[in-house]
Amino acid sequence: MTKNRILSAAKAVLESAGFEGLTIRRVAQRAGLSPMALYRHFKNKDELLNALMQDGISAWEAIVRGIRAQDPVKWLEALMEAYLDFALKQPHRFDAAFFLPAPAARQFPDDFAAGRSPAIALVMARIDQAKADGRFRDEPTLGIAVALAAYGQGFVSMQRARRFASDQQFKALYHAAQRQFLDSLKPSGKSE
Amino acid sequence: MTKNRILSAAKAVLESAGFEGLTIRRVAQRAGLSPMALYRHFKNKDELLNALMQDGISAWEAIVRGIRAQDPVKWLEALMEAYLDFALKQPHRFDAAFFLPAPAARQFPDDFAAGRSPAIALVMARIDQAKADGRFRDEPTLGIAVALAAYGQGFVSMQRARRFASDQQFKALYHAAQRQFLDSLKPSGKSE
DNA sequence: TGGTCATGCGTACACCGTACACAAAAGGGT
DNA sequence: ACCCTTTTGTGTACGGTGTACGCATGACCA
């Protein structure tokens, strides 16, 4: 389908030129179409961006599904590592997934609580598991999941805004916060 | 100075039209100048945005300096409340302060650790105080400060990306995370 | 064959940031 | 008072953007 060709072209342009360089004309050329042809398949640029967001989210969900760790806490550690990796290795795709305004649905807490976001559902399942195993305190699962998401998004947002002197500093502080966060979920006074 | 008049015009345009509507032509008109006159005072649009960032940061620092709570933990609670308020009541100014890419300096950890950011310096002083009073565990102060910043920025970033169904949900989850975060800093097994 | 509908294209418009050349004004030294 | 230099403002123009509109082309079905 032509629509998919356009989407592939858009992904390619985004990857090579970023959001600044993502223009209708450029995408059209890459897809071998005239600029206006694109509008037969997407109502406007926002709708194209929307499709890119969906693509980014799918990519992220595939990553989350691919995490193999058995232990729930280790799984969550791997999750945060994968998140960092996604943000640094595929920055534009990451931004499409996490920073573009959602048009509808995909909103906390309802849609996520209802399992409409597979990735969050997986995360919440692991949190529940850790709680059942006595590894986490009995905080609300959704609250933990949201806090985790905010943590990650906050760090990346600060990195995007050039708030860290280097990627090394960014990673170091991210990891420190990750450790502190997961530790804080343990039952009082307990350590492994 | 004309430069200040332009800056005021830019702030007014930003407030009423957002970043989307912030154009050179519009700012110039608001300042009673021709568009090109503006370039005598700012090298380009980025430099103007930079000035807006500085303005937003100053506003935030004034807010932080205005927090009156004595108790360091209560002070930090008030800080997070003020942060939320700033983000919701002056969204564009907030975004200028926290989301625009920093051009240089103003970067973790060096510039903040060196006291080059008054707001963070104040925050770190309160964290140190809480640690000295035995109210916080002995985690690295800078790490706590960065985590706090990331937390807030993450929540606001998610709200900007329309990840919350409503401002009520946003506030509720923000407050829950805030409580959980501050609790997690207490010495093991202790509660007030 | 003819008619209908989806798809693509060329042109055009309003807007954007800003380079360039020029005009006006504002000091400053004699 | 004069001239000269530097600063400040302006008008025009260029290449870029998203996209409205009308027309051409093709596919498909009666």
Image: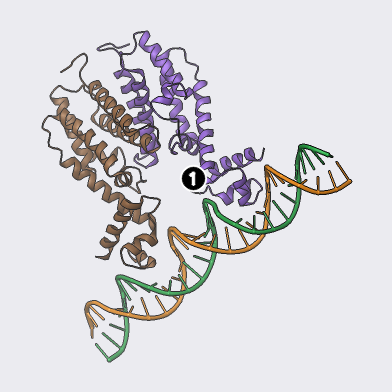
Chain colours: A brown, B purple, C green, D orange
Q: Mark 1 lies on which chain?
A: B
The structure residue drawn at horizontal position 63% and vertical position 37%, both measured from the top left corner, is B4
Question: Disc 1 residue type?
Answer: Phe
Q: In which quarter of the image is the C terminus of chain A?
A: top left
Q: Quadrant of the N terminus of chain A?
A: bottom left
x and y, in percent, of residue A32 in the image:
31, 67
Residue B12 against residue A43 in the figure, above or below: above
The structure residue drawn at horizontal position 58% and vertical position 50%, both measured from the top left corner, is B26
What residue does disc 1 label? B19
Residue B32 against residue B58 in the figure, above or below: below
x and y, in percent, of residue B97 in the image:
47, 34
The structure residue drawn at horizontal position 61% and vertical position 39%, both measured from the top left corner, is B8
Q: In this view, does A70 lie to the left or right of A78?
A: left
x and y, in percent, of residue A48 in the image:
34, 56
Res. A149 image quadrant:
top left
Residue A57 against residue B99 in the figure, above or below: below
Q: In this view, does B30 lie to the left or right of A174?
A: right
x and y, in percent, of residue B156 in the image:
39, 35
Q: Which of D27 and C20 is in front in this view?
A: C20
Q: Is residue B140 left or right of residue B26?
A: left
How would you rate the neighbour count of disc 1 (Cα within 10 Å): few for under 14, some for 14-19, many for 20 or more? some
Res. A72 image quadrant:
top left
Residue that protrudes farthest toward the top in the picture? B133
Q: What element carries label 1?
A: loop
Q: Which of B69 and A183 is in front in this view?
A: A183
Q: Is residue A74 left or right of residue B76?
A: left
The structure residue drawn at horizontal position 23% and vertical position 21%, both measured from the top left corner, is A183
